Image (cartoon, rainbow, N blue to C red):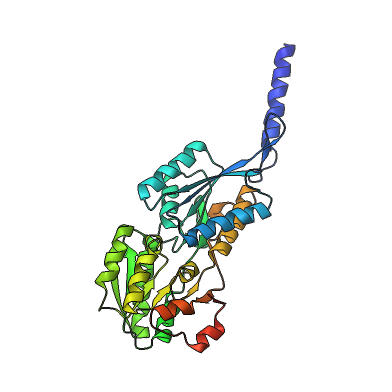
Amino acid sequence: MVASLLLSASMLLLSACGQQGGSAPTTSPTPDASGSKKPIKIGVVQIVEHQALDAARDGFISEMAKQGYAKDKDVTYDLQSAQGNMDTATSIAQKFSGDKVDLILAIATPTAQAAAQTTKDIPVLFTAVTDPVAAGLVKSMDKPGGNLTGTTDMNPVEEQLSLIKEIKPETKSIGIIYNSGEVNSKVQIDMAKAVSGKLGITIQEAAITNPTEVKQAAESMIGKVDAFYVPTDNMVVSSLAAILKIAEEQKLPVIAGEENSVKSGAIATYGIDYTKLGEQTADMAVKVLKGEAKPADMAVEKQSKMKLTVNPAAAAKMGVTLPKAMLDRADEVIK
């Protein structure tokens, strides 16, 4: 009888403890059996490796450390690349789910889609996603509604195309190569077409399905276009060198969708600072890990200021000279 009373009392006490609080659960380093803190686990997957996506990843990890989540101490990262393959991206997301990571960082649209299809329980922060709504990742930019949120790298396509007209006013036709399987690329093509009449240009497009097709696509446009525009298409950017080689040989200016492509040899862009975009995503991740907010309620964020980056040496290789007015207002001039 005494034992039964003690057992009942214990169960009531445990029940009462379990009902206290009501705040969102937190995920932070917790003591293990030895008393030392056990790091949280974050799975990081990017669709392919190139400067912009690498910068977003590094910016995320750096900012996490600044906010008390030091790599290999407070947090362990499982860093993975899908090498441009959607099936691989899905396998990586499934691995993260099986490992029960505390959070997933998905870099670029395809990997975010893979994570979204794989788990509904693990919070997913994405970055370098152009249009999260069109990609089916969130219900709306203001109210995502699920376990995903993050930062968008939607670029100012009209302003970027305008740079071509400023550099080479006689431009009538612009060639754009894009991955037909990447939603964000289709969005940018549609945006370019929408403003083409206003800018007095036509858009020549070439769809590809793997990086080896980029060179052939660029060659097919010789004699048909006056310049190239390289959007923030991960597959195309990873093969940017093939476009630059042809552009230099044919004296066709290349304008890019992001600044790392300009540093690699394109002429100019109004673009995203991907390091800062990664840092901004880390700010959001910290709030989720601390239980201060849930992805469903966190608006997708974007950068408020675009950066004008120009590369005069690249312009010279493509047979044009950058206008003084453009050089004067540039935020960064690549030397």
Quarter in which the N terminus is drawn = top right
Q: How many marks can you see?
A: 0
Q: Position of residue 257 (x, y in %)?
A: 44, 70
x then y, percent, for residue 130: 45, 64
Relative to 167, 295 lies left or right: right
| Residue 27 visible at all | no
Q: In this view, does 76 lie to the left or right of 31?
A: left
- Residue under the point 47% across and 71% down: 262
Q: Residue at x 46, y 39 (%)?
A: 95
Report x, y in % for residue 235. 37, 60
Q: Nearer the viewer, residue 103 or 300?
A: 103
Is 13 on the left-hand or right-hand side of 187? right
In the displayed structure, does residue 167 sit left or right of residue 297?
A: left
Q: Between 102 and 149, which is closer to the camera in this rendering?
A: 102
Residue at (52% x, 69% y) in the render: 272
- Does residue 175 appear in the picture of this structure? yes
Q: Of residues 8 and 152, which is closer to you in this image?
A: 152
Vertical relation: 324 (above or below) 107: below
* Image spot of residue 305 (x, y percent): 56, 73
The vertical placement of 269 against 211, above or below, is below
Q: Is residue 116 above or below residue 328?
A: above
Task: Please say if 267 is above or below 93.
Answer: below
Q: In which quarter of the image is residue 248?
A: bottom left
Query: Which is nearer the eye, 2 or 297?
Result: 297
Residue lying at the far top of the rendered structure: 1
Q: Which quadrant of the view contains residue 255?
A: bottom left
